[in-house]
């Protein structure tokens, strides 16, 4: 690869961090369903890592389970999908204005260990491909660098007034 090509790849792959204010401007989720606190290591069009600080104050812990709080697996998958949604919006830039990211498919979901209050979920999402308005991702949720869940999922980018 030539030096010019390497410089171009490095520029396109420049890492970005997205704070909670920008996340809230990018996706419509709000408390109690906003499940990503920050997105780091964003490489536009490729990958990113969502951060979710799991607190005993999460409303789902009241019923799941009161004597032994465990974060529901479907919410871990949702947190991965929200991270992917932020990545899509960041990747599309101004083209994403007035669009929403709709979950379409979840495949091969695996849950390896419970996520409990005090854990910090690191939600690694990697784009597998995108064709038109459909984006497919592989996600891995990690706590202390140990995989706790993984899944492959797809989302569609569409106008808000679908």
Image: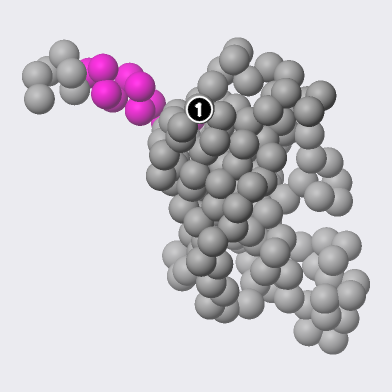
Q: What is the x, y in percent for residue 146? A: 46, 70
Left or right, 73 with reference to 128: right
| Residue at image point 62% right, 36% down | 156
Left or right, 154 with reference to 160: left
Q: Which residue is mark 1?
A: 132
- Tell me if mark 1 has few (under 14), some (14-19) or many (20+) residues whose alpha carbon lies within 10 angstroms of its own: few
Q: How many marks?
A: 1
Left or right, 128 with reference to 40: left
Q: Quadrant of residue 39?
A: top right
At mark 1, the secondary structure is: loop
Q: Quadrant of residue 53?
A: bottom right
The answer to whether any part of residue 117 appears in the image is no
| Magenta segment | 7-16
Relative to the observer, which residue lies in front, 111 or 118? 111
Q: Quadrant of residue 115?
A: bottom right
Q: Which quadrant does the N terminus fall into?
A: top left
The answer to whether any part of residue 133 appears in the image is yes
28 lies above or below 74: above
42 lies above or below 98: below
Q: What is the x, y in percent for residue 63? A: 89, 75
The answer to if 88 sits in the magenta stretch is no
| Residue at image point 69% right, 40% down | 102
């Amino acid at each position: 690869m030539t030096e010019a090509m390497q410089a171009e790849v490095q520029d396109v792959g420049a890492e970005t961090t997205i704070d909670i204010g920008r996340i809230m401007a990018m996706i419509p989720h709000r408390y109690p369903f906003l499940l990503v606190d920050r997105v780091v290591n964003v490489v536009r069009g490729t990958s990113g890592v969502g951060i979710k600080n799991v607190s005993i104050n999460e409303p789902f812990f009241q019923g799941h389970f009161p004597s032994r709080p465990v974060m529901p697996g479907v919410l871990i998958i949702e947190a991965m999908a929200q991270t992917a949604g932020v990545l899509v919006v960041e990747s599309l830039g101004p083209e994403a204005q007035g669009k929403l990211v709709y979950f379409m498919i979840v495949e091969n979901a695996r849950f390896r260990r419970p996520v409990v209050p005090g854990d910090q979920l690191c939600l690694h999402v990697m784009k597998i491909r995108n064709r038109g308005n459909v984006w497919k991702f592989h996600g891995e949720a990690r706590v202390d660098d140990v995989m706790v869940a993984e899944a492959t999922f797809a989302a569609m980018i569409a106008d808000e007034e679908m």
